[in-house]
Amino acid sequence: MQLRQLRHLATGILLATAIGACSKDSTSSSSTTIKDPQATIGAMNAVDSVFTSKQIQSVITIASNLPSFAIAPSLGPIVAAALPRPVRSLTPWQMRQGVDARRLRTALPEYIRLGNSGVTAVIPDSLKGKTFEWNTDSLDYEVTTRTGAPAGGVRFILYAIDSTTSQPAIPLVESATLDVLDESDATTTKIHLIVKGISGTPTFFDYTFALAYTQTSSSISASGFVTDETGHRLDFDNTMSDTYDAQTQGGTFAWDFAYRLNDPQVSAEFSYTETYTATTYTDQYSFSFTQSNETLSLAATITGDNQGNYSGTYTIKVNGNLYATVESNQSGYTFKDRNGNAVTDPSSGEYQVLQRLGLFLSELDVYSLELLSPAEALLGYYF
């Protein structure tokens, strides 16, 4: 079972459980109900609006057209082809094909064999200070004589995107600049990405991306912020790590991300850990969303095997108080409210906010991967 399939399974369970629990236990105290559903929906929409600003979507969409600066240029296309990039989900119930960390474990030894056991620079000196612009004939980025690029890196001109081709619309309309600074050392590959308005302000996107790896492990981290044109700023931290033992075919994969929005003040955190052997796995994950002194949280443990068998217990809380539980396995699900009563009626006064929460969870996992895509493309390493 793929990581992101497990994520969406949890999302669906959260939605169904929460909806049922609300309708079954309409006399719940204020500590176990959502105080202002519309305010909660508005807070989630505010997070969404930052990611969907045209400048951020421009750099994310164009990522597949960025050149690899060649830690492993021959491997990048192979791994990229093996991993379908994330696609926006329209419903929290929709399963999407996504990242399966174990598929990359066969690529990592080859990545290192090609000479990538440590780097002192990502961007060649011959390219530093250069600007890349879109060539409408070759439909690719190429170095031009345009000035203004940072001395320690390169600059890409970003454009309005044609939604049909996912490439710059023709005629070209410049929308922003992407500066890529090389901050690598002998042990860690690190680049700094900055997206600014075409005039130099404001800053829409500013984060560092670091990659470290050995013969048996790899890790990435991304930390920074994104903004939109209305002044919303979203700070984030996103880390993934994978440790693998080729002899036992076991290991541990972990993924954590956190987001903090300035206005309204909102935070969202997610943590996932999978411990696996050649035939079994145990997944543990948690999610929380906090706004206006109210926290919605989900925690789950799933155990399974490579034959498709699994079982798990999910716990939903509001402000730390039990809200609902669900027991799940390959045969189906059993929903219960906080009093342990079976839940069968999906109608609820809080349906809208819970539906939005389910979609919000789905969107956040997409956004978390999309944020990494420009750096992954530039490095030729797709985690």
Image (cartoon, rainbow, N blue to C red):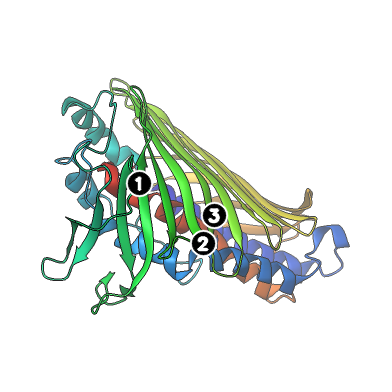
How far apart in space, not on screen, are marks 2 and 3 (Cα)?
38 Å
| Residue closest to the far left | 138
Point out the frontmost of discs 1 and 3: 1
User: Foreground: 279 or 110?
Assistant: 110
Q: Position of residue 132 (x, y in %)?
A: 24, 56
Question: In the image, 383: left or right of 319?
Answer: left
Relative horizontal placement of residue 322, taking residue 45 as reference (left or right):
right
What is the number of the mark on residue 357? none
Q: Residues within 10 Å of mark 3 (few under 14, many from 20)?
A: many
Query: Quick check: can you spot residue 38?
Result: yes
Is residue 166 visible in the rendered structure shown here?
no
Residue 345 pos. (x, y %): 68, 73
The first of marks 2 and 3 along the sequence is: 3
Quickly name the residue at label 2.
202
Dot label at residue 10: 3
Where residue 88 appears, x then y in whole percent? 41, 66
First along the sequence among labels 2 and 1: 1
Name the residue type under label 1.
Answer: Pro
Which label was assigned to residue 150?
A: 1
